[in-house]
Image (cartoon, coloured by chain):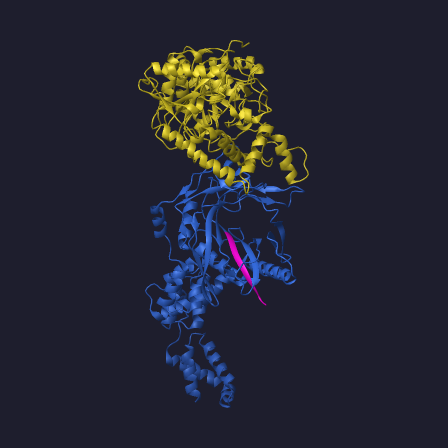
Chain colours: A blue, B yellow
């Protein structure tokens, strides 16, 4: 009998605010340790939290984007536990009444689109960081991150297997970045996932006992950790054992999960409403305002692109991989004809994406502006440039040499369309390469290609290859 | 001058009959002379005080400042003071120096008051006798074998013994009013949210409220004018238009409806205390006030409700004292857990640990619903009792405490007996209502009796007016402890 892997993800997305969720300290990454920890973050005696409205608005924006219910009244609670990087001895979070409940995230899977259900999304503060190296038997505490606003997004156990979990995590990542609530920087910890993993025999309806896997800070690790954990659980069950509910830590170096604490050792967090903060009340007008400012969502954009521009699903997916990418594409094709749209889509999905990937940058940092790219595409569609020449012009644009027209002019790259000139070049090549001409006539196709190459070389690539082919064939006939 | 009220000192300062520096010296000398006996102050910094007094005199000379400019006051050691040690009565914060001023400290400083020092208190404001202080008990100025009440016992004795004209305090279950009553002075706990809690070290956040202790109701009004005000750093601070709390001092008592709850005159009330309170009530009636019998049916539950909610909040509020970043850390420990355990075991006193344990218990999985949640529901019922009562009356009158000051050490072994001392003061903070205590007589042993008046939300000006009228016709508040050295 085969097994089904059941996964639910808890994702912590750092909200893009300038200051912390309950203090005025900066959230910028990379400052000297404790340089961005104010009296409130250090939890000095007598300090009090004040809620950052910007964090609330971003949480609502996310809730609206996934179609969640925005609770008009939600409550901040204290989650009590001792840890050196938790200065107050409690984390301010939301427990019984989160700001958003329900909603779904559309995920593209090989078998089609799946709407992964969300349980909730709630606001909370991040803890600081414990540094165990370089302190000679002691630990260092950096509280710069303490109080950073997080949105914890909890999915239902709707995901089946590691691949599906990763697809959901990627879709969620793209979404939070798209709507601007999170910068999505996983190296800096702006987007982190914990996975609840259980297994059951195919056909069973009850869930198996789950284990929570922590420390999944890349998609690759997440996939490996879930696969490892599922194998571990299946192994235990097939040997007649039982799964203990526990929290496990993924070790990427050994590619395994190991027990962090059992259910018995689990903390009793003693949640209770934080008496320092009033209930968070959200007004209809705020929701309406945030909804009005919402960008067109990725799913809507994919649909519109596919329909309006007749794009393949794969191309539409690439062109909507980020809000900036989609906007870039639409900026290039402003009032363009069908052929221009087709060329642009292919060009961005192909050349531009490849170059961005090679440089490891996003479209927002692309050195070629939408207007520049349009200049290139126009010369391609009007026949001024062959695709080969277009690539050369493109390279020059990426190197900062200006517009397509300037580069064409400066380098003299205009495609030869004068039939007489091309015929002359062909005649010269034929005269100089009698051997290949004989080979061709003897039936060697390769010789023909070589002759085309010679003509292209003689014209420094400016001859129209289609014309060259046609003329050669005619003259050799 | 030592016996003058703040209002009188203000006039003297305005008239240049005295300077702030002279006043500061006078009270510093008095503190120097009496503190060894009474232990009302934990920290005094004379130079700092005189500097502030000189600045106040300079402000007065420039015809700047207000009625409080140049008035010396004492701060309960629960208020953070920048550069001046803030201990909260605990070994945990024995050497803690705050980098910032509490909102109350800031406001009083900008009004021109001069800080004499930081007053002793029950550790983290947990106690009703000032015996839980790490810095030793405060002694009652009326009888040094008696407790002064708590937790603001140091502030109360500082005023009673004329070591300061006025002082700040905080009240969670009676910590301003009960010591005021036991030391023969006046104390006001304002409506929750009127005085910012920023920089006031938290005990039970939903109950804690700062307020003044002084010799007269008029002085309370002057101090509250400076202390109250919106502060965006405290999310529970109320954004209201500023008001003059002294505007109703000439309040007309004719027609005033005084609610008298049977629940506050039942078993356990000392006969002399009852007699004192009833005499005061008769005086009000003689002025045209009307007695209205009212019921507060859930008031009897206030004490158990309080001793679930306050420890619950305290157990969480005090988690930050872990020895990691500031405050007491055990000298030796084996690992992280051991450091927590030892630091907190050694840094906190018995009463604080008792309340942390109780609070942790009532918030625990499986007990939360039965204790914490149930207590929250009862808290609402208690508040509703008051709302219903205020449809029929304007103020509620009763005793502040069941007895006068008890002997040092007499209740230390029995926490419940100790807690019962707050039985009349606890309902008001549970409902968030303003309440004050003023002296209304003495018992057979010459110990002061406190009269407790609870008002409706934001009725401080009226409460103070009622109290002021009583004090114009009585001199209980002006009597001096007889046996001071």
Q: Is residue A388 above or below residue B229?
A: below
Residue B63 visible to an observer of this rendering: no
Residue B45: quadrant of the picture? top right
Residue A259 vertical position relative to residue A239 in the rendered view, above or below:
above
Quarter of the figure with residue A341: bottom left
Q: Quadrant of the C terminus of chain B?
A: top right
Q: Position of residue B374 (x, y in %)?
A: 48, 37
From the top left corner, tell me how far across and down residue B220 is, in percent: 41, 20
**Of B459 and A326, the residue lying toward us:** B459
Q: Nearer the viewer, residue A450 or B470?
A: B470
Where residue B388 appears, x then y in whole percent?
Answer: 36, 30
Image point (52%, 55%), residue name: A9
- Where's residue A472, x and y in %? 43, 84
All told, the count of numbered labels is: 0
Magenta-colored stretch includes residue A44: no
Q: In this view of the protein, can residue B40 be seen by the observer?
A: yes
Up the image or down, B228 lies above or below A6; here it is above
Q: Can you say whether A245 is above or below B42 in the image? A: below
Instruction: Give the position of the N terminus of chain B as an image quadrant.
Output: top left
Dominant secondary-structure state across the stretch colored magenta? strand
Residue extent of the magenta highlight: A1-11
Q: Residue at x 37, y 61 (%)?
A: A331
Left or right of B28, for residue B12: left
Near-viewer residue (A232 or A178)? A232
Please state if A287 lies on the left or on the right of B404 as rendered.
left
Residue occupying the point 61% across, 62% down? A234
The single residue placed furthest to the front in the displayed view is B267
In the picture provided, is B9 more to the left or to the right than A436?
left
């Amino acid at each position: 009998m085969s097994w089904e892997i059941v996964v639910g993800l808890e994702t912590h997305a750092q909200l893009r605010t300038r200051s912390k969720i309950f203090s005025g300290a900066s959230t910028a990454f990379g400052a000297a340790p404790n340089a961005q920890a104010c009296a409130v973050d250090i939890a000095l005696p007598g300090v009090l939290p004040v809620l950052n409205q910007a964090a609330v608005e971003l949480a609502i924006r996310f809730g609206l984007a996934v179609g969640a219910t925005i609770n008009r009244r939600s409550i901040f609670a204290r989650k009590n536990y001792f840890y050196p990087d938790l200065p107050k001895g409690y984390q301010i979070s939301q427990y019984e009444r989160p700001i958003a409940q329900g909603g779904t995230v559309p995920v593209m899977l090989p078998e089609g689109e799946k709407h992964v259900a969300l349980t909730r999304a709630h606001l909370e503060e991040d803890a600081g960081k414990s540094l165990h190296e370089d302190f000679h038997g002691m630990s260092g505490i950096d509280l710069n991150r303490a109080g950073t606003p997080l949105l914890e997004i909890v999915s239902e156990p709707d995901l089946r297997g590691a691949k599906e979990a990763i697809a959901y995590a990627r879709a969620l990542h793209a979404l939070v970045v798209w709507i601007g609530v999170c910068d999505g920087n996983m190296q800096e910890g702006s987007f982190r996932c914990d996975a609840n993993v259980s297994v059951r025999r195919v056909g069973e309806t009850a869930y198996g006992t789950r284990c929570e896997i922590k420390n999944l800070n890349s998609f690759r690790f997440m996939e490996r950790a879930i696969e490892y954990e599922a194998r571990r659980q299946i192994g235990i069950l097939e040997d007649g054992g039982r799964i203990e509910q526990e929290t496990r830590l993924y070790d990427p170096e050994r590619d395994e999960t190991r027990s962090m604490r059992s259910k018995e050792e689990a903390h009793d967090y003693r949640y209770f409403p934080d008496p320092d903060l009033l209930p968070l009340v959200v007004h209809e007008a705020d929701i309406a305002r945030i909804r009005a400012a919402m960008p067109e969502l990725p799913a809507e954009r994919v649909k519109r692109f596919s329909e309006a521009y007749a794009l393949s699903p794969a191309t539409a997916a690439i062109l909507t991989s980020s809000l900036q990418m989609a906007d870039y594409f639409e900026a290039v094709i402003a009032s363009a004809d069908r052929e221009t749209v087709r060329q642009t889509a292919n060009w961005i999905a192909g050349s531009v994406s490849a170059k961005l990937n090679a440089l490891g940058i996003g479209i927002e940092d692309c050195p070629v502006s939408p207007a520049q790219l349009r200049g290139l595409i126009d010369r391609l569609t009007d026949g001024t440039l062959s695709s080969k020449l277009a690539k050369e012009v493109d390279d020059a644009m990426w190197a900062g040499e200006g517009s397509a027209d300037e580069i064409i002019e400066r380098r003299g790259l205009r495609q030869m369309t004068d039939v007489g000139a091309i015929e002359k070049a062909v005649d010269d090549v034929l005269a100089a390469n009698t051997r290949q001409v004989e080979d061709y006539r003897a039936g060697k196709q390769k010789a023909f290609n070589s002759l085309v190459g010679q003509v292209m070389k003689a014209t420094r690539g400016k001859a129209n290859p289609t014309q060259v082919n046609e003329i050669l064939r005619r003259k050799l006939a | 001058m030592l016996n003058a009220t703040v209002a009188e000192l203000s006039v003297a300062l305005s008239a240049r009959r005295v300077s702030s520096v002279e006043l500061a010296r006078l009270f510093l000398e008095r503190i120097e002379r009496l503190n060894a006996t009474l232990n009302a102050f934990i920290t005094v910094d004379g130079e700092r005080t005189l500097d502030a007094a000189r600045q106040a005199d300079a402000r007065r000379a420039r015809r700047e400042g207000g009625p409080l400019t140049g008035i010396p006051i004492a701060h309960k050691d629960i208020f953070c003071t920048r550069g001046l040690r803030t201990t909260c009565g605990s070994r945990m914060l024995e050497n803690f120096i705050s980098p910032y001023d509490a909102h109350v400290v800031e406001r009083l400083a900008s009004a021109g008051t001069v800080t004499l020092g930081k007053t002793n208190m029950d550790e983290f404001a947990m106690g009703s006798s000032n015996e839980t202080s790490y810095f030793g008990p405060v002694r009652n100025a009326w009888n040094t074998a008696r407790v002064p009440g708590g937790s603001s016992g140091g502030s109360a004795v500082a005023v009673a013994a004329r070591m300061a004209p006025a002082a700040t305090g905080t009240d969670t279950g009676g910590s301003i009013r009960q010591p005021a009553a036991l030391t023969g002075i006046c104390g006001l706990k304002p409506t929750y949210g009127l005085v910012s809690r920023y920089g006031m070290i938290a005990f039970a956040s939903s109950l804690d409220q700062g307020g003044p202790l002084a010799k007269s109701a008029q002085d309370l009004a002057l101090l509250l004018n400076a202390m109250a005000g919106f502060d965006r750093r405290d999310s529970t601070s109320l954004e209201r238009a500023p008001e003059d709390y002294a505007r109703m001092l000439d309040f007309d008592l004719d027609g005033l409806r005084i609610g008298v709850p049977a629940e506050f005159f039942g078993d356990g009330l000392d006969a002399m205390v009852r007699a004192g309170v009833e005499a005061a009530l008769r005086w009000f009636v003689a002025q045209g006030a009307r007695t209205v019998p009212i019921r507060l049916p859930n008031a009897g539950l206030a004490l158990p409700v309080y001793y679930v909610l306050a420890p619950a909040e305290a157990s969480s509020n005090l988690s930050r004292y872990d020895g990691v970043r500031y405050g007491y850390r055990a000298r030796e420990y084996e690992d992280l857990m051991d450091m927590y355990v030892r630091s907190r075991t050694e840094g906190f006193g018995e009463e604080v640990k008792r309340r942390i344990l109780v609070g942790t218990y009532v918030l625990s999985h499986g007990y939360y619903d039965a204790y914490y949640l149930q207590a929250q529901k009862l808290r609402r019922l208690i508040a509703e009792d008051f709302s219903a009562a205020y449809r029929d009356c304007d103020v509620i009158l009763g005793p502040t405490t069941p007895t006068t000051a008890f002997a040092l050490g007499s209740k230390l072994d029995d926490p419940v007996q100790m807690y019962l001392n707050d039985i009349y003061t606890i309902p008001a903070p549970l409902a968030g209502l303003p309440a004050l205590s003023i002296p209304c007589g003495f018992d057979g042993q010459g110990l002061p009796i406190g009269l407790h008046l609870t008002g409706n939300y934001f009725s401080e000006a009226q409460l103070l007016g009622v109290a002021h009228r009583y004090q114009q016709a009585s001199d209980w508040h002006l009597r001096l402890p007889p046996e001071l050295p």
